[in-house]
Image (cartoon, coloured by chain):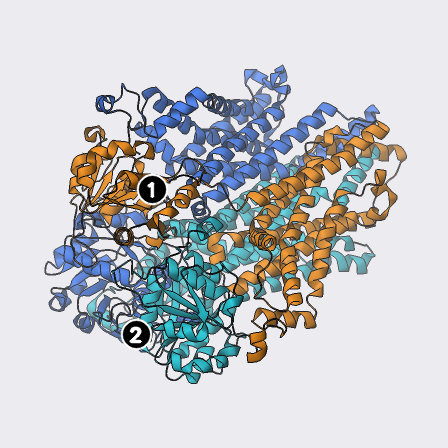
Chain colours: A orange, B cyan, C blue
Amino acid sequence: MTDEMDALLPDTGSAEDPDVGVISPTVGILGSGDFSRSLAIRLVTSGVSVAVGSRCPKRITPGLFPDAVELTSQERAVTLAEKVVFVAMYPEHYSTLSGLRAGLQGKVLVDVSNATELNLSGPSNAERLAEAFPECSVVKGFNTLSAWALQTGAQDGRRQVLLCSDSLEAKNGVSSLALRIGFHPLDMGGLIAARELEVAPLRLFPSWGSSVLLLFLLFLFFYGYGFVRGILMPYLAHGRNLFYRLPLDLVNETLPAVALVSLALVYLPGLLAAVLQLSRGTKYRRFPRWLDRWMCGRKQLGLLSFLCATLHGVYSLCLPLRRATQYRILNGAYRQVKAGVEDVWDEVEVWRSDLYLSCGVLGLGVLSILAITSLPTVGNTLNWREFTFVQSGLGYAALTFSVLHTLFFGWDFTFSSEAFPYYLPPSYLLAVTLPCVVLVCRLVLVFPCLANRLSRIRRGWESRRRCPVMAASGTTPEV
Amino acid sequence: MTDEMDALLPDTGSAEDPDVGVISPTVGILGSGDFSRSLAIRLVTSGVSVAVGSRCPKRITPGLFPDAVELTSQERAVTLAEKVVFVAMYPEHYSTLSGLRAGLQGKVLVDVSNATELNLSGPSNAERLAEAFPECSVVKGFNTLSAWALQTGAQDGRRQVLLCSDSLEAKNGVSSLALRIGFHPLDMGGLIAARELEVAPLRLFPSWGSSVLLLFLLFLFFYGYGFVRGILMPYLAHGRNLFYRLPLDLVNETLPAVALVSLALVYLPGLLAAVLQLSRGTKYRRFPRWLDRWMCGRKQLGLLSFLCATLHGVYSLCLPLRRATQYRILNGAYRQVKAGVEDVWDEVEVWRSDLYLSCGVLGLGVLSILAITSLPTVGNTLNWREFTFVQSGLGYAALTFSVLHTLFFGWDFTFSSEAFPYYLPPSYLLAVTLPCVVLVCRLVLVFPCLANRLSRIRRGWESRRRCPVMAASGTTPEV
Amino acid sequence: MTDEMDALLPDTGSAEDPDVGVISPTVGILGSGDFSRSLAIRLVTSGVSVAVGSRCPKRITPGLFPDAVELTSQERAVTLAEKVVFVAMYPEHYSTLSGLRAGLQGKVLVDVSNATELNLSGPSNAERLAEAFPECSVVKGFNTLSAWALQTGAQDGRRQVLLCSDSLEAKNGVSSLALRIGFHPLDMGGLIAARELEVAPLRLFPSWGSSVLLLFLLFLFFYGYGFVRGILMPYLAHGRNLFYRLPLDLVNETLPAVALVSLALVYLPGLLAAVLQLSRGTKYRRFPRWLDRWMCGRKQLGLLSFLCATLHGVYSLCLPLRRATQYRILNGAYRQVKAGVEDVWDEVEVWRSDLYLSCGVLGLGVLSILAITSLPTVGNTLNWREFTFVQSGLGYAALTFSVLHTLFFGWDFTFSSEAFPYYLPPSYLLAVTLPCVVLVCRLVLVFPCLANRLSRIRRGWESRRRCPVMAASGTTPEV
């Protein structure tokens, strides 16, 4: 909400239930920090009475909390709260609540804290709170919401709150409250689930870890290979100083290789899965675990491949800005004048250069469309057929353009002996082998005999040798 | 949900209704594939009991379904289900359910299948199911949701499920279930609507078809025109071999022309609509159908125009990388040395070049901001006034920069006879005429007399000759 | 919804409540424009009966409204409506409703209009309507929804409708209706809040105003400074004509300076806040108001900085396209031939050039990732730790790369006297000072003594001199 809308907070707190005309019970919040403030604002605008208990009520800046909220001492807030009390404090201070034990008896405590370290052994904060207050019911929830999402109401869809508790009645009460303020509660089970709930917000990009590691290793490999082949060996063998190539040239040679290989690795698991299904004759046997994890990591691999491809494009566009390029042009002009050659036009070179540049631009353009449809909202406007068309159809188009870009770049030079100094092939030749294999396999799967059989398997058909029951009853009906 | 949260699925299934304390009836699912699994997970986490019936219950990998789900035979699942049974199978196998007829009597079957081809004649799968099981009520629904959205709960807003059925009571029951699991049901009418519901997910970008076709035709036209004018005629007339221009040069000449014309076509229907409203004196007469369709296609035309403009920008930035450019520089240096000219500085050429480059970059920058606000979520954070400012205000700014870019590029060269070989004008001159017309018309509509009248018409005013009733009663009050 | 789905609108209007089996009361809408149409469609698909009252019912194009809607005269629509009547008209025509006074008695009027000018004095449209119809209850609401969001159901999350009214019962009734059609109502208080509600949709990017102004002033400063130092002084002192540098060169010198300074200004308030908290020993005292506003404007400053950096990148990539660059190369080749120099290779210059280009590309790449995570949906998929890693960790990485880019660009040339013509330092040297200060301060805050103390303060600890009560009770427990 903007500052102006902030000014609209009602100044007469209404306890009327806007939905069914029932007076909603007052909710208590212990604590007066950011989370407490955001939660109080949300409750009040949804028509719930709130009493906030602070250790130092006078110290709170006037105007920070809506006027409808009753700012008072912790003891009084606990007394005013009829059922639910949010414990909006850091867990290291739960012991300070022992003085409120009498007033908290029989109430529902909601623990909104997160863990401080990724450690699933030992009791969670919620379990420790339950142990300290056995006469209360403890519900774990709301800890995955940021204060901002609480206050503005998750306009962008992040509506789900995960709850867990050993007491069903307490969980129901907090669920109703969550629904009242516009969130959708999900039941995660007993309080034992609190351990995972508390640790989840600490995880740093759990689905990206292996993809980033893989790309980093690919980068190290190709950079090292290019360094040995292009800088170290010429230095050791002929004393040529090419170390200026390290910051830009060599990076621009490594990035496309990494992008090519990772883009091929995005489409390879799909082919392996298809081959597995064809050979097994059924889709109902699970894939090996490594293939499952590979399939789940395809989106991250694809986005990282797009990042490398874009950086390669930008580095390549920077090449004319380099002093090295300018020196080469000037030296070339000098030599041409000295040799008295009026026209250095090489038609084949011109065609090769234009073709590989054009293919590169088109490949990057198609990859951009793929990346844009990976954005959550854009992806959600597509139905399954459109999504498959883009991710699979345009994806293979991008792979094809990239392979053509590399092959045009190599041209016939790749097959000359100059391309293999010290018997080492150029990086791009190493990088383009896997994409070529992927494209060829995909073409093989287009043959009607294989494509039709795969389509039937994916719609539930099973070869008779798979399931004896089905051999008796006929084709498989399940989707 | 991540793998870790997957592990949180409750292992004691609770049939307690978290909302109102009522025990929710068990739901049955026939089938054990992906959709069945995702639906089961969703139902269980929302507190609904689930019984999944599979032809081969033992064959299902352990751990695939949550422990709270009862995995059993199809007959038993149908018996356990109290009211609603999801038929999560491919339609070609509905006949295999005939053995379950007794158990299914009086229950509500939910058909979640999609059609296999875009054919609206003949009965839908839902209608065939209803015919085969006349003693059941059939509800069509949930077929537009992907398994992923079902499982994770549509965090990004795709919450709507479309339902249709001939039985109101059955529809209500499935609606309540949809609400329970966090989706919003929409009533689409009787079962006859199932034909369109089943075909909708098959449509491939229905709103983009005509825009893509139009741009493709524009591309063909300008590419062919440039080919004839720039490559074929010089070859036929003077034997000059300019075919190397095909992959990159000619494409880079065609793309900006296509981008310019399509950007003008984005703003032209708004002007035509304004002219229509001004001449008719009212906003309450509908526009001609072709104008309506044109207005609906503006967003797609604009995004495609932005794509062409960006590709043109990237191709232009690639020009210094071409061998052709390098050869030209070397040949030019050679000629300069031979001619003994020390300084080739042409001030006018320098200004022209810098001006058109600068205008081009600014035009592309403004178009980028337009494209970013077309993303669903960014567009949703803008109110109507901000959206109009961006799409209309910045849009005309982009069109102006693009026209200036083209005019600076043409400069006075455009009016020399060299620009008209074989009496054919350059592509950019053809392309820039429509945008200029659009800009001039827009300027005319800024005149206060026209602008004020149009504003009044859009706020509901009608000229007296329009509506005799209004002539009697005064001005029009409707919005 | 697509056109095809539009065709699915039920043709038998059902008044059955899909949720609880209660017949929902008919809703009336006065007016037959876009808003009226979209609202009618939404109500009908959610199972509510609708009667639309138009001044000229025969004039409405057939097929515009769903068949289930009763299109009739205003008087009859008011009679058919049981409780709620939407006044979908422009406010200047409210007086024409006086003839309906009898039929409207005791009903709830919903005012959906917006203001025409940003003026908070004087009564709002809703208050004027309430004054004109004292026997009705007036509720202000639904005015922030676009017709499109109403019709399609806010698939992307914009679900909230803000309501305000002096009558609680009327507000409850409209709230239930909003919930029925899939929106989430928020109570904004009494009808006095209508003034702000009506003006809110008129505000044009209220949070961006100061950031855009600041960047504009920075641009003016650096452009003027560069003009004086690089064009005017050489002209006045030596008569050199460098005015051709105005459209591109000078802009490309200004943009990076503006980007650098604004990126530093994004991270500076965080450092000031940390210093304040460290010196005060507590996090519970509010920051000065200017610091609060600065902290709120950081996202906009960051996005504008990214825009300037990207434009600088594109302008720099355009440099080889300029005629000026080509002339320089040709003249350089001429001079080299005349001087008989065979090889102009300067190793230091080559390294400098490659290093600053590489740092620039990496800095821009990291800023792109930052910009992408600023998109609402992408930001929402990140938890707090991931968001902080990106915005803070990657942010400081981007700042570091940008500073390195500038320092490599300056190299040792910066310390020569040539860099200070007329005793004026180059723009980039002025621009890079603030980022260097920010980076140094951030490094200082990494020292364990300061970092640990700051972390404890942020988890609620307070130095004893802060709060006498806490001095008595121990550490502070509030979050």
Q: Disc 1 is attached to a residue of which chain? A: A
Q: Is residue C282 above or below residue B435?
A: above
SS state under label 2: helix
Q: Is residue A39 left or right of residue C123?
A: right
Quarter location, residue B338: top right
Q: Secondary structure at mark 1?
A: helix
Q: Are marks 2 and 1 on the same chain?
A: no
Residue A170 image position (x, y, % from top left):
26, 51
The amino acid marked with disc number 1 is: Glu
Label 1: few (<14), some (14–19) or many (≥20) C-alpha neighbours in 10 Å: many
Near-viewer residue (C10 or C102): C10
Which residue sits at x=41%, y=73%?
B76
Q: Judge left or right: residue C284 versus residue A349.
A: left
Q: Is residue C136 visible?
A: yes
Instruction: Quadrant for residue C350, please give it.
Output: top right
Q: Is residue A28 above or below residue B123?
A: above
Image x and y of residue C284, in percent: 29, 28
Residue marked by disc 2: C59
The residue that disc 1 covers is A127
The amino acid beneath tag 2 is Arg
Real-space CA distance between mark 2 and mark 1, rounded to the nearest whole angstrom = 68 Å
Q: Circle 2 marks a residue in which chain?
A: C
